[in-house]
Image (cartoon, helix red, strand yellow):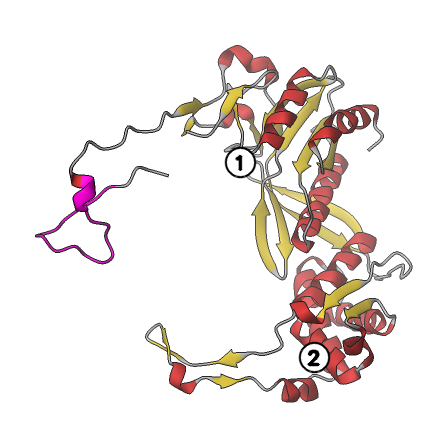
Amino acid sequence: MFNPEYVNIFGVPFTFLPHESEEDSGGPPPPPQPKTAIEPVNEKKEFEISWPNIIRIEAVFKNKLTLDWDKVKPLELNAFDTPQVAEMAPTIDGKTDMTKIKEIDLQKLGEKYRYQRIIFEAAAENYERMSKSWKGTKQNLLAQLIKIVEQFISADKIQITPSLFHQDDFKKRIILTLNMNKVVQHIADAIRQDNIETLEPVFDSDRPIRSTADMRTWYTSKPCAPANKSHINFCVFDSTWEATEAFQLGRNKNVAAWVKNDHLGFDITYVFKGIVKKYWPDFLIKFVNGEYLVLETKGQESDEDKTKRQFLAEWVRAVNEKGGFGKWKSTVSYNPSDIPDILDKAFKGEL
């Protein structure tokens, strides 16, 4: 992010520090790249957008967990995408001792992980995620999860390719064991979709509401342009896609204000493979009727992207159920050309 700096210490070039070369010592340093200040503008205060500053959302589940198996999407596992040869070696003082490397015996792994153990471990992982917000007894939760995982595995909801791995019981157990995180995540998503009773947003006690006015001035050398209908002076572009969308947002008659979510502090907390993460949707939009839209731009979606969308949908639901912050919606743009249709449908309430 900064211009390179060089150093020679007592004539000895340290290997962990870049040092001045003979070619660089002859001429003047390159001119610094121009920097543009990005900040809210008082003259554009009418385009300020505010939002609830939510730390996390606590999901309260139903006491009796149920799944509509016809709606549960199958989990697709590709054996060729699964590492089937694994080696292990001890690490001493941060260095791997390659003289003691040995291969992990997948044969023993398949013999060790019978279906009952796979079911129990997948249920236990989901239990850890749900137990904190569970209102009933812990034993009841674990028993229901074990039953759901057992039904999931026996209901042909897992598709393994090539079919040889799916037909061979032993190989199927190995693939399931090596993809345990995907199995757990898939079941967790299905349970959350059908069994959330209420969503309770937990606000930041120091700053429960944030807005575009809170942005601190920052500097960039990336391409940018004046932002029409935005509280921020310039919109910084990471791609031509974003530039196209910014142009459309600034000229759409139904858009009262918009802002690119860059250095704003608007984030969505989500859980993927048992790890708590955050992500930042691309645009916040306010319509002339007072409703809001969180817009994400994406080409191809990964499993993690789908999880992000689910937690964003929960954020929108929690804010709307809480009330007092206006009506919020969220959607995804998969192509720059679909922005006019998205804005039109969102304004008419068709999303």
Residue in the foreground of this view, choosing between 59 and 314: 314
Name the residue located 79 percent from the left edge and 59 percent from the top edge: 191
Does residue 206 appear left or right of residue 24 in this picture?
Answer: right
Other-residue count near label 2 (Cα within 10 Å), few / some / many at <14 / 14–19 / ≥20: many
Name the residue located 38 percent from the left edge and 81 percent from the top edge: 97
Residue in the foreground of this view, choosing between 226 and 330: 226
Does residue 99 appear left or right of residue 109 in this picture?
Answer: left
Quarter residue 140 falls in: bottom right
Highlighted range, magenta: 5-24
- Residue named by callout 1: 265
Secondary structure state at the residue bearing disc 1: loop
Residue in the foreground of this view, choosing between 271 and 64: 271
In percent of width and height, residue 14 lies at 19, 57
Asked whether residue 235 appears in the rendered view, the answer is yes
Asked whether residue 116 appears in the rendered view, the answer is no
Q: Where 142 sits versus 270, above or below? A: below
Other-residue count near label 1 (Cα within 10 Å), few / some / many at <14 / 14–19 / ≥20: some
- Residue named by callout 2: 174
Residue extending farthest left: 10
In percent of width and height, residue 300 lies at 69, 46
In percent of width and height, residue 162 lies at 77, 72
Type of secondary structure dominating the magenta stretch: loop
